[in-house]
Image: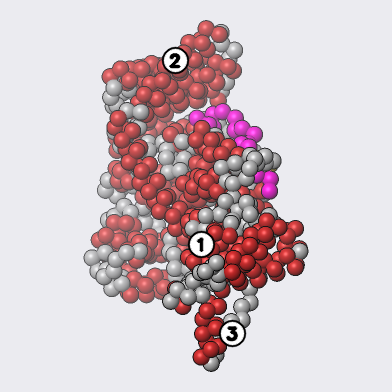
Amino acid sequence: MIGVNNELVDIEKRLSDLLQQCNLDPFVSVDTLKRWMKDMNDEDPMTSVKMLTGLLDKEKLVDKDLFENLIKTIIGLSHHLPSQKFNGKTFSDELKRREKQGEPSSTYITDITLPPMEWIDYYHKAMYTMNKQDFFQASKEFEKTFEKLLETKTTNQDIYRVFCNAGSSYLFSGKPVLGVQCFEAALELNPQYTFASEQLQKYQRGDFDEIIKLGILTEIKNNFEEWNKRPDYLNLDIVMKWPEKKILNKLNSFGVTVDKIELTKVANTLNQPEDLAKKLFYPQANMTGKDDDFIWMAAYALWDIYCPDELSISGFNDVLHEAFIFVSDEKNKRNTITKESFEKTCANYFKRLQTYIFSDKKDFLKEWKNTIDIDMDPCYELNIFLTSLLTNPNLEKDVLEVVHHLKKQIPHPTWIGIEIIRNIIHNNPQSNELYKELKCNHPFYCYVACDIAQYYLEKKDYLHTEFYLTDALEIIDSRAEKNKLSLDTTETTIYDDYINVINLLEEVLEKSNADSKKKKLLKTKKQTVEKKLNIYSKSPKIEKIDNAMNELFTKVEIDQAEKSNAIQYYNYLKKFDINFETKEPIKTTETYLKIHPESYLKSRNSKGENHSNEKFRSKIGRNDPCYCGSGKKYKKCCLERDRKKIGQGRKIPVEHR
């Protein structure tokens, strides 16, 4: 036939037969390969070869003659197809032209491993680390896997499995958007891949919500630690260890000069190093950005060097927190040290705290209260520590003196609570009068009732514990009815207090073997509160804020996902239109990994706290930042879970491949 390239027809027929012999015909056709060459020959002439050989299974790779024949034939096909490089002519035509005109033909020496296999090493590392439950390292290895696939321009028959397993590692390491995109990519490549569809369904049902949250928190923590490890990163702990000369030299480089005498004199009139920085250093400074942080760090360090005995709010907080942790730890450890040793240590802390509490610096306590986070009860740690001292007869008088001073300087109902517990210890009926007076003056303040209940609970006096917890519920009922707060500090919702008190009351009723009627009434109360809480949490205002935050977070995640090697490789792979779909649904076996949330929580860098299956009420303030690092208050985060037993672990399915 005129116009028919018989040589090309012969090559296409041989290639079609070879595709069938190599079991590649379900994936690509000769027409598909021709399109590859048309699209890719100006980019990388070997791309088509690398992509095609990547699809070969191991059995066909062993057959050397078949493999070499396939490569020669596909290269032969590329030589007989029109190319833009040669103005629409073929490479064979170009060789003939050069030979006819006596032009030299370029010789290309290519050193390529076919098929490219470098990516497999990274994939094996990724699967190994994922099966060890190290999803964060696994996600890094998967990124290297896709990077290498992109670099070598190849693929694999089971590439959809790679996407799915990568999706699991991304999902559980705090990248849910990227994880879901990888599951969807696996399904688009092979709709018969049931494992990917099952993972997506579980995600949509919320089966993975808890582990995803932990992954996000741990990802934030890991990023923060990596930032800390940067050689150019400065934090307060680092600067506090610098010698005086180094601090002064760095300040001088920003235009700040320091006069030791003046600094000491000014510090005597201030309550915190930040004010020192504002008064002496910032007016001189000629820099912006991250260096701005160094100024206040230098103020802390120089305050410590030049006037270490000068009282400061930060020093007060440090001593107070140490005292609080000591008392809380010993209360939970139960008699790990002698009573004499415990009282001696407490007395030492108390003596140090008295220096700050009775400071003659102007407005010291008021500034201390105002510098603490507005969402936290500023007196909680001091309350717990002072209450613990009431059992020591040698300190009782001094404690009451401190309480009376605090009531004058920073009025707060919590100080009255300490007085009430002191009277209870001495069986003084005045405790009842004080409690009535407190309720009259602070009708919506339930926390003193809770503190008294906690005291009785430690004494295993369940009758009085139940009485005060029931009273706390009634106070919250009144607050809910009036729908207002009488506190200076801000509580997020009334419902948090409801749930906290109800949970503790449930525990008490169980221990005291209360009758079933009480338990049933309390259960009904809890259900009503939870229903109202659910309605509150779905209010238009709250929902609008949540949606806005979720949209922002999702946008950032989507931007990051699009830049990932996984999605870039998937977008590249789609250009080749390879048919990865299998005829039958793929049955996969799964290995179940036990994920223990507490193993994530222990990674928090704390001062020796042991957060296991303890009751945290006496150890961590309801309004303190949660120990898990979420940034939320404890009562809004892990309090509910800590009052129940931590589960044995969540089972996360990962393909056993």
Q: Earlier in the sequence, mark 1 or mark 2?
A: 1
- Give the residue at x 32% y 74%: 252
Judging by the rendered image, the residue that carries numbered circle 3 is: 107
- Give the residue at x 43% y 22%: 530
Q: Is residue 642 magenta?
A: yes
**Which quadrant would the N terminus be assigned to in this image?**
bottom right
**Region of the chain picked out in magenta, as a range:** 640-657
Where residue 47 appears, as percent x and y from the top left, is 56, 67
Where residue 214 appears, as percent x and y from the top left, is 52, 43
**What is the residue that sits farthest to the bottom in this orientation?**
102
How far is disc 1 from disc 2 in space, using C-alphas? 69 Å
Judging by the rendered image, the residue that carries numbered circle 2 is: 525
How far is disc 3 from disc 1 in space, using C-alphas? 25 Å
For badge 1, the amino acid type reads Arg
Closer to the camera, 205 or 534? 205
Judging by the rendered image, the residue that carries numbered circle 1 is: 35
User: Is residue 166 depicted above or below 528 in this figure?
Assistant: below
Closer to the camera, 247 or 480? 480
Q: Nearer the viewer, mark 3 or mark 1?
A: 1
For badge 3, the amino acid type reads Thr
Q: Earlier in the sequence, mark 3 or mark 1?
A: 1
Q: Earlier in the sequence, mark 3 or mark 2?
A: 3
Where residue 362 appears, as percent x and y from the top left, is 26, 48
Label 3 secondary element: loop
Q: Nearer the viewer, mark 1 or mark 2?
A: 1
For badge 2, the amino acid type reads Lys
Whether residue 634 is visible here, answered yes or no, is yes
Label 1 secondary element: helix
**What is the residue that sits farthest to the left in this orientation?**
283
In the figure, is residue 474 to the left or right of 337?
Answer: left
Which quadrant holds residue 266?
bottom left
How far is disc 3 from disc 2 in space, using C-alphas? 86 Å
